[in-house]
Image (spheres, rainbow, N blue to C red):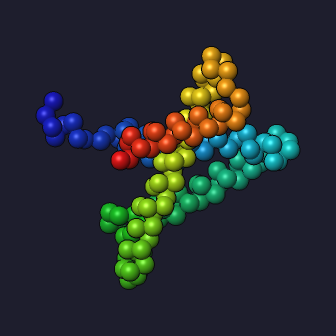
Amino acid sequence: MTRKELNRLGVLGATSYVVGSVIGSGIFVSPKGILQNAGSVGLSLIIWVLAALLASLTAINYIELGTSIPESGAEFAYIRFVGWTPIAFSYLWLASLIQSSCSGASLALTFGEYIVQSIAPITCLSSHDSKIAAILLAHSILCEFLV
């Protein structure tokens, strides 16, 4: 394969990337908390349906913006389109610094928790030590891939 062929992203790959970015690790982390705080399975399912409806409405808004303003850059392009270039610049920097780092930290922490849970039977760690091990593993992952 040539270098140009290796750098291509097909429809399946692009769809997988977008779905993975939207879902993130929240789908694996939040059901337990929602069920505990809701108190019943029925109410937690209603909350999930409402959240899915809200996500669908957000997707419809992005579809409308994407077809109305055919520029690359997503939110930056949409904010700049209405003439708010300084705000668009600020948004882009804040999104890059805060949103990306928070989502990366969340994914790394979730991965760390699952790894620690999977090896917990052979390590005999206490609950507190397991949390510390998951945080240290997440920190190691972030340092390895971000630095």
**Looking at this rendering, what residue extends furthest in the left direction?**
2
Using the image, determine if residue 88 lies above or below residue 28: below
Horizontally, residue 56 falls left or right of residue 65, namely right
Taking the spot 43% from the left edge, 78% from the top edge, the residue there is 87
**Looking at this rendering, what residue extends furthest in the top direction?**
122
Toward which corner of the image does residue 78 lie, by quadrant? bottom left
- Number of disc labels: 0
Residue 50 can be seen, yes or no: yes
Taking the spot 25% from the left edge, 41% from the top edge, the residue there is 8
Percent across and percent down for residue 117 are: 63, 27
Using the image, determine if residue 67 lies above or below residue 125: below
Using the image, determine if residue 90 lies above or below residue 109: below
Toward which corner of the image does residue 35 lie, by quadrant? top right
Percent across and percent down for residue 5 are: 19, 37
Taking the spot 41% from the left edge, 61% from the top edge, the residue there is 96
Using the image, determine if residue 129 lies above or below residue 88: above
Residue 20 can be seen, yes or no: no
Horizontally, residue 138 falls left or right of residue 66, namely right
For the residue pair 94 and 137, the one nearer the viewer reads as: 137
Percent across and percent down for residue 55 are: 59, 55
For the residue pair 82 and 94, the one nearer the viewer reads as: 94
For the residue pair 75 and 65, the one nearer the viewer reads as: 75
Toward which corner of the image does residue 3 lie, by quadrant? top left
Horizontally, residue 87 falls left or right of residue 56, namely left
Taking the spot 15% from the left edge, 30% from the top edge, the residue there is 1
